[in-house]
Amino acid sequence: MNEMTPPKSERAAALKGLGTSRKRVEDARFTQGKGNYVDDLKLPGMLFGDFVRSPYPHAYVKSINTDAAMAVPGVVAVLTAADLEPLGLHWMPTLAGDKQMVLADGKVLFQGQEVAFVVASDRYAAADAVELVEVEYEEQPVLVDPFKAEIEGAPVLREDIADNLEGAHGARRHPNHIFTWEAGEKEQTEAVIGDADVVAEEMIYYHRTHPCPLETCGAVASMDKVNGKLTLHGTFQAPHAVRTVASLISGIAEHNIRVISPDIGGGFGNKVGVYPGYVCAIVASIVTGKPVKWVEDRIENLTSTAFARDYWMQGKIAATKEGKITGLWCHTTADHGAFDACADPTKFPAGFMNICTGSYDIPTAYLCVDGIYTNKAPGGVAYRCSFRVTEAAYFIERMIEVLAIKLDMDAAELRRINFIKKDQFPYQSALGWEYDSGDYHTAWDQALNAVNYKQLREEQAQRLEDFKAGKTRTLMGIGLTHFTEIVGAGPVKNCDILGLGMFDSCEIRIHPTGSAIARLGTISQGQGHATTFAQILASEIGIPADDITLEEGDTDTAPYGLGTYGSRSTPVAGAATAMAGRKIRAKAQMIAAYLLEVHDDDVEWDVDRFVVKGAPERFKTMKEIAFASYNQAIPGVEPGLEAVSYYDPPNMTYPFGAYICVLDINVDTGTADIRTFYALDDCGTRINPMIIEGQVHGGLTEALAIAMGQEIAYDDMGNVKTGSLMDFFIPTSWETPNYITDFTTTPSPHHPIGAKGVGESPNVGGVPAFSNAVHDAFRSFGLTQTHMPHDHWRIWKTANGLGLHD
Amino acid sequence: MEKMHLKLTVNGEQVETLAEPRELLIHVLRERLDITGPHIGCETSHCGACTVDMDGKSVKSCTVFAAQANGADITTIEGLGNPDGLHVLQEMFKEHHGLQCGFCTPGMITRAYRLLQENPDPTEEEVRFGMAGNLCRCTGYQNIVKSILAAAAEMNAAKEAAQ
């Protein structure tokens, strides 16, 4: 090394690459109120759309009179299904192979369903007119309980497909039945359960909830009739897929559609689907020739777009008397609402629910899921989780606890003796997945030691004694969870959405002066892609992250990709980024060798440059190479320095973690005071520890909400009871604890940089940890299962039911 | 509906506009005055994304009528920094990863600004209580609280140095 070359470590640090807690480049604009969200957009002549929605959960629409609404000053149009029908847009395809009404076509199937779309010069005129649209309804019997969907005399909801007994996912046995999906070995599993020493059986309900990002869904459609181009700005987690779908359903050629996802104020799965508001905004813009904005309000958001969960999971788990699990059986009744609008890969109508064997070596298993129509809003999205993975994790982590009670065993020990061992990876699960890597025992021991588990149990026993002696009215609960996720969908051979393979992409251009721009097929909703993907590239191509611009979300410029959800950005687009970077480096090597007048193989990579092997004083930096690529005529090498990679992952990635929650429950008030929450995550290679920790804090707080109070609840008549933030629980800074984060690192063997994804782990692992802690507090009083959410009222009722108020 | 003539001071500047009396302050700011920093998250006063400072108090501008705001002195996130740089709260939110999607951030920082006027040296508990009117779905608040406490410490140190 000559004096001019700073040491390796110094040069590597200057790149701010992998493993650096680099500060976010997004924050300058967000902290100054200079973000650009869809509702900030103001186009010349822009009109506002607003919906007339059904007050009834099930009714025929007899007539719609728009005269009074049209008379409101400023109102330009009122669209109904009759207006959309000639365009074939009164119904639209869902992501799950079903179809959904855009505007009520003769009947309504859930409270809040879109009936008419008012277009006006401002939002106040539109809201006034919405009140004046006269709709005559004829109420019908309502189906709320999915277990009553197939009984005799049950109302038929989807008359449009009542006679069609072959659905998108196979045979339907009743007009209210959507699909049956199975995995594993039924007979073998039932035989194992029949012969087992011990069997624990329980119904585990994961209630209906909602992603509820702080920014609701919205779009601005702008049809330019002069050049025939449609520009659609919107809250889209998958802008390219939206472009393709918009083209297919509207008939507008795909090259004439430009979809732009601007800054997005949180997604959490809410912004994956296609909603009637988007379609109506497009039609209204075509009809009026003006840009049309539609942004839903919070009540509309909670009641009509994208619920999550609502899985009734009947489980049986078999074990030897020593606690070795021999079999797992699960039947799930999935309440899908009025249309099957789940956001799942085509071949997986129940998502990746078959990850429900969790972190355990379970030799035999069987899973069956029945999808059911009810008079509730459509959805079934992955609320901060990979497709149905949080349901699966909650199921197995509750079943383990239930089994521990049956065996009278410590739940930590029961987990330990059943974990898949490190040397069993890659591990073939009984329900069909190949787990790529893991080291569960190490993580588990680290977690138990960190919280001093043994001492906690002693303290809990003492507390119980004090409680029984009348010295305290609080009980202590210790909630354990070891979860395994399956993310990074996914391999094109078995993962697609509407026929679009779930690869992702990155395109890189190096500028002559040695800085760069990279564009991806994903879109950040707060994850900080502009920060972290530049870090991946910095390590790959030796250009400082600060000199790399990241762009996403504009389909006219970004390469095609399937977007950001299901923790797929890092596993898939992150891999594409690394691979595109490696293409850049391969070409840079040829250029460097030419400039250094040696053979290609005689130079080697050194952080930010190529050096001649054995002669480190002879080198070319990436900055020099970049310039040379633009100004030298190099034989056999094209000018410029660009690359694109479309990455089709060979497998999913399998992040895991060990979470422990300690809480104190006041049996008289039903309040749960979270004392400690420890979260150990193994997401493989860590790109930006600061951002990982932030993701964990946020995901845990969503888990806290779901486990402890958040739900979308319906009454027996199909009315939504939780339609505003008054009733729909979102924790404030006051209720939210501080979290302790920790990690182990088990890189993914098939990912180019070994990363696995982390954004959704805390929601997947957090919900069972909170819930198990509540259950654990009451374990010695005979409680085995009580349904979430564990709000104060329900906890009080549990205590009361166990006789603790006597 | 007949419009009224509104006069406001927004971020130190006198502004005038016509608006219906029933219009909400957040709509006047965002749509008539093009001040899009404050956001709309719920329209029911729960989430705090629309928080602005009005006559020395934090208000949720989605539940203030334009008519009520006539003559008021309003500060939004756009008015917190100065030409020399960012407000220390803005700096500390960047430094301590106090934001992710950024949608709650303008309301959050504007509320924190008033909180630190009311209580320049708050405990963590006081910050958590004083910020409870502003919801965040991304961060779990841990780093928001850290950012605000760090800003308070910086502001107090600067004050001490000036004395």
Image: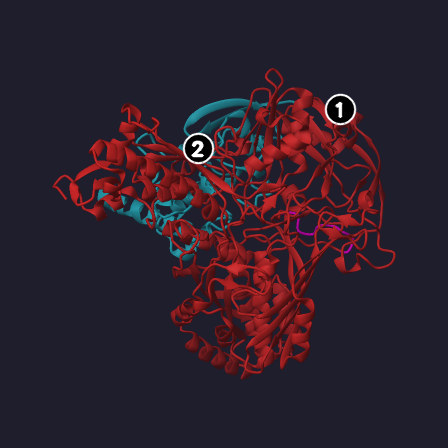
Q: Residues within 10 Å of mark 2 (few under 14, many from 20)?
A: some
Dot 1, how many residues are within 10 Å of its Cα: few (below 14), some (14-19), or many (20+)?
Answer: many
> Three-letter amino acid code at disc 2?
Lys
Instruction: Please identify the quarter of the rendering in which residue A87 is found.
Output: top right
Mark 2, chain letter? A
Q: Most prominent secondary structure in the magenta stretch?
A: loop
User: Are discs 2 and 1 less than 8 Å apart at CB?
Assistant: no
**A191 or A804: nearer the eye?**
A191
Colour of chain A in the rendered structure image: red
Q: Position of residue A804 (x, y in %)?
A: 62, 77
Which residue in the protein does label 2 denote? A34
Split into 4 quadrants, where in the image is the C terminus of chain A? bottom right
* Chain that is coloured cyan in the picture: B
The residue under the point 75% across, 48% down is A167
Residue pictured at 43% horizontal, 77% vertical? A454
Q: Amino acid at mark 1?
A: Met
Give the residue pinned by disc 1. Answer: A70
For the image, the number of numbered tags is 2
Report the magenta residues as a range.
A716-724
